[in-house]
Image: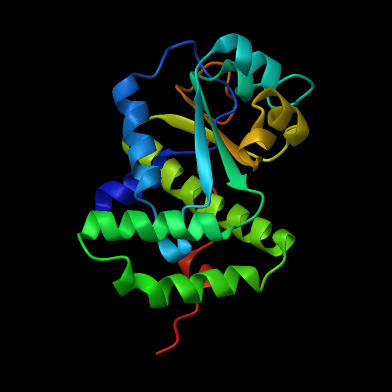
């Protein structure tokens, strides 16, 4: 338990990275953690693009004040669904039946409930829901990176249309929700690397209701 608290106390939003490359093993650890993260209905309404190609990173970071996009070892792009369809629900039900070795018929009630729920929402509502699910995955990625003593920076201030166009996300009916750079902090250049973490007290944050 203390190890997790130490990991979280160690991490911060890194401003400057060295040119050291993160190993595939550590990146795969983060990606597996993302894949195992909590997801409403188990639907996982997003996909992850893990980008280490420097030329592509530079294109994605064009006109952005976030230099971490191009200078980090890896860039993880969380691309959420534009809408939730019956096919998305059906695919999840089929996978569940296969993984648990049960019949699709036994999951008909779950399918009908989920399909009806998402059909009752507008595409915009379902898109916003998918974004929120991607942010849950982002939180897991941050923790996983810290566990591996990898620095990271979650970012919103980027040109999402530029990302969508370069990665051709429209062809997958996806859009860029949030991004995460991963690498190793440059302690000499990063003014935050040696500063104390600042958070409000637990008593101020938490209200216990017994």
Question: Which quarter of the picture shows residue 69?
Answer: top right
Image quarter of the C terminus:
bottom left
Q: Is residue 19 above or below residue 210?
A: above
User: Is residue 144 rendered to the left or right of residue 122?
Assistant: left
**Farthest residue, direction bottom:** 210
User: Is residue 74 rendered to the left or right of residue 80?
Assistant: left
Identify the residue shown where x is 43% and y is 12%.
20
Identify the residue shown where x is 69% and y is 16%.
59
Q: Is residue 174 above or below residue 19?
A: below
Question: Which quarter of the picture shows residue 200?
Answer: bottom right
Q: Nearer the viewer, residue 171 or 154?
A: 171
Identify the residue shown where x is 70% and y is 32%.
164
Q: Position of residue 133 (x, y in %)?
A: 53, 56
**Farthest residue, direction right:** 63
Q: Is residue 157 above or below residue 37?
A: above
Structure colour scheme: rainbow
**Farthest residue, direction left:** 101
Q: Position of residue 183 (x, y in %)?
A: 46, 23
Q: Nearer the viewer, residue 210 or 89?
A: 89
Image quarter of the N terminus:
bottom left
Identify the residue shown where x is 45% and y is 42%.
142
Residue 199 visible in this rendered orientation of the protein: no
User: Is residue 123 rendered to the left or right of residue 195?
Assistant: right
Q: Nearer the viewer, residue 3 or 81?
A: 81
Q: Nearer the viewer, residue 178 or 119?
A: 119
User: Is residue 47 rendered to the left or right of residue 8?
Assistant: right
Residue 44 visible in this rendered orientation of the protein: yes
- Give the total of numbered labels: 0
Q: Position of residue 11 (x, y in %)?
A: 45, 39
Q: Position of residue 147 (x, y in %)?
A: 32, 39
């Amino acid at each position: 338990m203390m190890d997790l608290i130490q990991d979280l106390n160690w991490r911060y939003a890194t401003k400057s990275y060295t040119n050291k490359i993160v190993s595939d093993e550590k990146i795969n650890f983060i990606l597996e953690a993302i894949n195992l993260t909590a997801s409403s209905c188990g639907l996982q309404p997003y996909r992850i693009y893990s980008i280490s190609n420097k030329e592509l990173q530079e294109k994605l970071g064009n006109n952005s004040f976030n230099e971490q996009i191009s200078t980090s070892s890896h860039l993880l792009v969380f691309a959420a669904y534009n809408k939730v369809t019956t096919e998305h629900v059906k695919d999840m039900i089929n996978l569940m039946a296969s993984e648990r070795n049960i019949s699709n018929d036994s999951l008909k009630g779950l399918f009908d409930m989920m399909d009806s729920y998402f059909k009752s929402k507008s595409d915009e509502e379902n898109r916003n829901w998918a974004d929120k699910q991607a942010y849950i995955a982002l939180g897991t990625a941050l923790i996983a990176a810290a566990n591996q003593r990898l620095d990271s920076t979650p970012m919103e201030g980027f040109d999402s249309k530029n990302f969508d166009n370069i990665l051709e996300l429209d062809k997958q009916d996806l859009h860029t929700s949030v991004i995460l750079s991963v690498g190793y902090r440059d302690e000499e250049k990063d003014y935050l690397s040696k500063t104390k973490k600042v958070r409000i007290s637990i008593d101020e944050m938490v209200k216990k209701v017994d």
